[in-house]
Image (tube, rainbow, N blue to C red):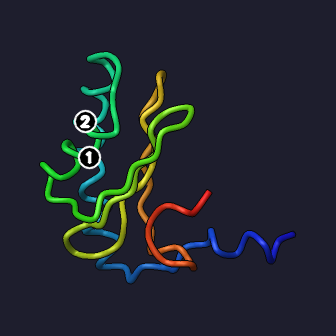
Amino acid sequence: MEGNEQYRQRHDLPDDVATAAEALVPAVTEVLEQLRLAGPTTEDDVRAALESLGLASVQTRSGAGIAFGAAAPEGGYVFGAVEADAVTIEVGGVIMDGGCLPAQ
């Protein structure tokens, strides 16, 4: 079963790329937290908020919350979710099968 999940693993980022992407986390957290607190949030809201911060190739997916992934300007990806009670954000490389969010 472990082999079936390898496509979800992320490539490592060089230190300088990881540092640049991690520098975006406070701004991304702030803008997404404002959306979350404002009320019902849509995929379009999340996409527009991330693009306003200079992130590109934004992917979103609705479910229990709104999962998102976006390419950082210096490389790497910022990804996570906007849920009813919290915003979660991580930084990492592309997943093994390409892109930022794994296929469902």
Q: Secondary structure at mark 1?
A: helix
Q: Quadrant of residue 63?
A: top right
Q: Residue furthest right?
A: 1
Tell me the amino acid under the disc marked 2.
Asp
Question: Could you tell me which quadrant the C terminus lies in?
Answer: bottom right
Q: Is residue 58 depicted above or below 32 in this figure? A: below
Question: Badge 1, how many Cα within 10 Å: few under 14, some, many 20+?
Answer: some
Q: Would you say 81 lies left or right of 39 here? A: right
Taking the spot 31% from the left edge, 18% from the top edge, the residue there is 37
Q: Residue at x 70, y 75 (%)?
A: 6
Residue 84: mark:
none
Q: Is residue 56 left or right of residue 76?
A: left
Question: Which residue is depicted at the point 30% across and 66% down?
Answer: 71
From the top left corner, tell me how far across and down residue 74 is, in percent. 22, 75
* Disc 1 target residue: 47
Residue 97 x %, y %: 56, 78
Give residue 77's quadrant in the image: bottom left
The picture places residue 79, in percent across and down from the top left corner, at 41, 55
Residue type at the position of mark 1: Arg
> In whole angstroms, how far apart are the C-alphas of marks 2 and 1?
6 Å
In this rendering, the answer to whether 102 lies above or below 12 is above
The quadrant the N terminus occupies is bottom right
At numbered mark 2, what does the secondary structure look like: helix, strand or loop?
A: helix
Nearest the camera: 66 or 54?
Answer: 66
Q: Is residue 77 above or below residue 98?
A: above
Q: Is residue 15 above or below residue 29?
A: below
Q: Residue furthest bottom?
A: 14
Image spot of residue 56 (x, y percent): 22, 63
- Residue at the spot of label 2: 45
Direction from residue 29 to residue 95 in the image, left or right: right
Q: Are marks 2 and 1 in contact (CB under 8 Å)?
A: yes
User: Within 10 Å of the Cα at label 2, are there few (<14), some (14-19), or many (20+) other Cα atoms?
Assistant: some
